[in-house]
Image (tube, helix red, strand yellow):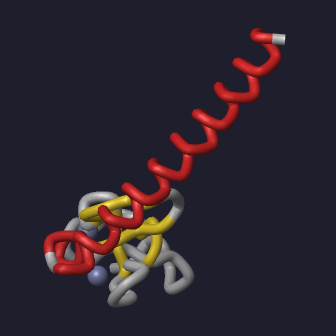
Amino acid sequence: MDWLGDGFMKCEKHQKPLEGACQWCGKQLCRYCVGKRWGSKLFCIECAQSSVGHIIERKQLEEIRKQEQVESKKRDIRKIFEDY
Ligand SMILES: [Zn+2]
Ligand SMILES: [Zn+2]
């Protein structure tokens, strides 16, 4: 018997509420199905372990690198003011 009704989606494997769909294959995921989180995006375990996972990791690295560049730029600006 489905107490939650048709409007509420549950994971078939874990019987937990779904958090969202895999951004790659579109599979519905509960929190136990999530293999990787990238910001607000979710990826299933299968996709996270496949080549997609490496793409995600590379993108994450790019994001981190970008952030570090911004931080170092801020430091440079600060240095200019300190030297002044
Ligand atoms: Zn997937
Ligand atoms: Zn699940």
Spot the residue most to the front. Answer: 84
User: Does residue 54 sit above or below 84 in this rendering?
Assistant: below
Percent of width and height locating residue 28: 37, 80
At x 37%, y 74%, the residue is: 10
Q: Ligand 1: give its quadrant.
A: bottom left
User: Of 39 and 84, which appears nearest the observer?
Assistant: 84
Q: Which part of the image, by quadrant, shows the C terminus?
A: top right
Percent of width and height locating residue 14: 22, 66
Spot the residue most to the bottom. Answer: 25
Q: Which part of the image, by quadrant, shows the N terminus?
A: bottom left
User: Does residue 52 sit above or below 65 in this rendering?
Assistant: below
Q: Quadrant of residue 50?
A: bottom left
At x 33%, y 89%, the residue is: 25
Percent of width and height locating residue 15: 27, 67
User: Of 19 and 81, which appears nearest the observer?
Assistant: 81
User: Does residue 7 sit above or below 19 in this rendering?
Assistant: below
- Could you tell whether 36 is left or right of 81 in the image? left
At x 58%, y 34%, the residue is: 72
Q: How many marks?
A: 0
Percent of width and height locating residue 68: 52, 40
User: Does residue 58 sit above or below 73 in this rendering?
Assistant: below
- Could you tell whether 48 is left or right of 18 in the image? left
- Could you tell whether 2 is left or right of 45 in the image? right
